[in-house]
């Protein structure tokens, strides 16, 4: 029997790179998508170090034409796709007052519509075969509204909603949907995600607390290969579940928010003093940001 075929988007770094390598080492024929082949030297070198064979495809999930061309190339070469891991995405820091609608649209186009483009490319074949797995990488920010990241949060909540509906839509066809909800994982995205468009100066505490959260998280960040192992488990387990929180802060933040009343959530935002905010955060989530 031929190897199952997996497509991992955003395979150039972080979770995508680790997942592509992990699946390739565990019996999958893996196609990793990258926006530029000229910047893919590190993933190829790391794959070689791990004894994993990857096939890279140049594909930009933000473009209809690029996804169509890239997925067509994969289907011509492999004949089918058994697993799609929608990992590629972008960050987005801003409070709602100072975030232009164009930024919401750009982040949504990548983080939500990019996943939709790839899903639509592989589902006809999966339905025909009566099998397959769609893995959507969301975030803790898809279950709790992370401070001063309004466009990112909005896109990840949207991807959570898409995934929940998709799971029911595809259940009759024997296609599995899994949602991976990472907290802070070692990834290049955090080094790039440093914008703070605080035009009015009114939101200084919000951005300060945002960057303090990530500074703490990066000091304790989870190895992305752990997330790759979890994705492999979600694909192969005989007892699948829809959602899988993981990485630093993942379970604590999602479970803590679920236990909070909406009134308590809003009240935490009223803190004027950082130390009071951090104390409230620790009480709610068990994570010390101070």
Image (spheres, helix red, strand yellow):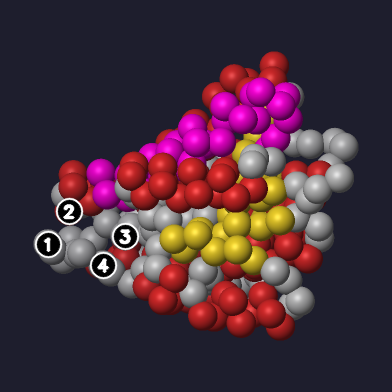
Cα gap from disc 1 to disc 2, whole angstroms: 8 Å
Above or below residue 88? Residue 56 is below
Residue 240 coordinates in the image, percent (x, y): 79, 36
Cα gap from disc 2 to disc 4, whole angstroms: 10 Å
Point 13% across, 63% down: residue: 199
Identify the disc placed on residue 93: 3
Q: Quadrant of residue 198?
A: bottom left
Tags 1 and 4 in contact by the CB under 8 Å rule?
no
* Magenta region includes residue 157: no
Find the magenta span and give its range: 105-133
Residue 231 coordinates in the image, percent (x, y): 71, 52
Tags 4 and 3 in contact by the CB under 8 Å rule?
yes
- Residue 24 falls left or right of residue 213: right
Callout in the foreground (1, 2): 2
- Residue 158 falls left or right of residue 51: left
Instruction: Name the secondary structure under disc 1.
Output: loop
What secondary structure prevails in the magenta region?
A: helix
Q: Quadrant of residue 194?
A: bottom left
Instruction: Name the secondary structure under disc 3.
Output: loop
Residue that badge 2 annotates = 98
Tags 3 and 1 in contact by the CB under 8 Å rule?
no
Residue, far front:
76
Point 87% across, 37% down: residue: 238
Residue that badge 4 annotates = 196
Residue 139 coordinates in the image, percent (x, y): 53, 51
Callout in the foreground (1, 4): 4
Residue that badge 1 annotates = 200
Q: Which of the pair 6/192 is nearer the observer?
A: 6
* Magenta region includes residue 129: yes
Instruction: Name the secondary structure under disc 2.
Output: helix
Residue, far top:
172
Q: Which of the pair 77/206 is nearer the observer?
A: 77
């Amino acid at each position: 029997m031929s190897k199952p075929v997996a497509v991992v988007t955003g395979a150039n770094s972080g979770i995508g790179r680790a997942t592509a390598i992990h699946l390739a080492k565990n019996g999958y024929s893996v196609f990793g998508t990258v926006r530029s082949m000229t910047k893919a030297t590190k993933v190829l070198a790391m794959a070689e170090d791990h004894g994993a064979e990857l096939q890279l495809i140049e594909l930009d999930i933000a473009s209809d034409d690029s996804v169509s061309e890239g997925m067509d190339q994969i289907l011509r070469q492999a004949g089918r796709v058994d697993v799609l891991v929608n990992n590629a995405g972008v960050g987005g820091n801003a409070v709602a007052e100072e975030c232009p609608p164009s930024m919401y649209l750009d982040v949504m186009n990548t983080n939500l519509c990019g996943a939709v483009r790839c899903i639509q490319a592989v589902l006809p074949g999966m339905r025909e075969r009566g099998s397959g797995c769609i893995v959507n990488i969301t975030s803790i920010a898809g279950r709790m509204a992370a401070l001063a990241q309004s466009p990112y949060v909005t896109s990840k909540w949207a991807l959570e909603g898409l995934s929940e509906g998709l799971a029911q839509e595809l259940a009759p066809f024997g296609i599995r949907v899994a949602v991976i909800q990472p907290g802070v994982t070692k990834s290049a995205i955090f080094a790039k995600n440093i914008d703070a468009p605080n035009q009015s100066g009114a939101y200084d505490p919000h951005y300060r607390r945002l960057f303090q959260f990530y500074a703490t998280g990066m000091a304790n960040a989870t190895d992305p290969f752990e997330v790759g192992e979890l994705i492999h488990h979600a694909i192969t387990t005989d007892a699948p579940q829809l959602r899988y929180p993981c990485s630093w802060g993942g379970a604590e933040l999602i479970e803590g928010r679920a236990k909070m009343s909406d009134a308590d959530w809003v009240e935490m935002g009223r803190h004027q003093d950082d130390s009071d905010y951090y104390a409230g955060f620790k009480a709610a989530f068990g994570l010390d940001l101070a």
